[in-house]
Amino acid sequence: MIEPLVIALSKGRILLKSLSLIKKAGIIPIDSINNNRKLLFNTKKKYLNLIFLRAIDVPTYVKLGAADMGIVGKDVLLENGSKGFYEPIDFKISKCRLMTAGLIGFNIKKRKRKVATKFIKIAKNYYASKGINAEIIKLYGAMELAPLMNIADEIIDIVDTGNTLKRNGMEPKNLITNISTRLIVNKSAMIRKYKYINPLIELLISII
Ligand code: PRT
Ligand code: MG
């Protein structure tokens, strides 16, 4: 008897791209995913199930072994720690950049800058590595408003086209790191279910 494999997908922005990618490997949900109340899906591969989670919960499920594998943005891994799992594939989809950004033309001259972001850990590491004195303000969304409303000198956020920043009178300043979607695998599942996980990893690598 084959033990079922569970892959955790991130809901939201990267879900459709992740689904169309694994579809090429024959991993296709049986029920319509448009029934958005449903969070657990059987697939056409009998031994393989999908769960849909908030992106931020994907590493937790994989770390705890509730999911054997997960598909999630590198930003989420950097912010929520990357211990407890392997990261064997960069799918190179949903690419974007993690950047500092501020009001157009504005240069920070203060000794201690205020930085609004939801990426607290990434921000602390970044400013520490640059020797910059920064007070980090945790926000959960609409970071682009913070400089405009005068609660921060700059923000750290994900930038793709730059349109969101531009529309709010801001511009990207410094690149922190490039981001893309990754496959993560629970460490003990990798050993116990190697026979099933390894061919799947090879199949996924062959289709990207
Ligand atoms: O929404 P929730 O709080 O549940 O989770 P989430 O915000 O982490 O998820 P979601 O669905 O918004 O994004 C999931 C993942 O998509 C991120 O973890 C990234 O790895 C990836 N990704 C790729 C992006 C973008 N591109 C992106 N452009 N995530 C967010 N953005 C946002 C950005 O925050 C900013 O508001 O889009 C805006 C910038 O886009 P441009 O094109 O205007 O520059
Ligand atoms: Mg979001």
Image (cartoon, rainbow, N blue to C red):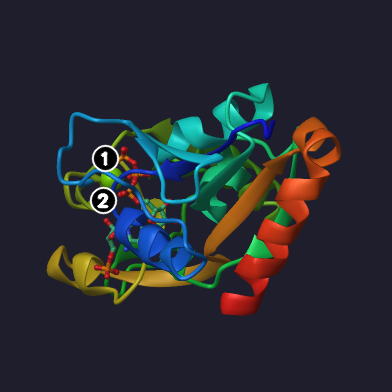
**Residue farthest to the front, as pictured:** 1
* Residue linked to disc 1: 141
Query: Disc 1 to disc 2, how far (Cα)?
Result: 13 Å
N-term mark: 1 or 2: 1
**Residue farthest to the right, as pictured:** 191
**Callout 2 amino acid:** Pro
Quarter of the render that holds ligand 2: top left
Disc 1 or disc 2, which is closer to the eye? 1
Residue 101 place in picture, x, y as percent: 38, 63
- Report if residue 208 is visible in the image: no
Q: Which mark is residue 133?
A: none
**In contact (CB < 8 Å): disc 1 and disc 2:** no
- Viewer-proximal residue among 2 and 138: 2
Q: Is residue 90 above or below residue 155?
A: below
**Callout 1 amino acid:** Gly
Secondary structure category for the residue under label 2: helix
Q: Quadrant of the N terminus?
A: top right
* Residue linked to disc 2: 147
Kindly indicate the quadrant of the structure image that contains residue 140: top left
- Report if residue 5 is visible in the image: yes
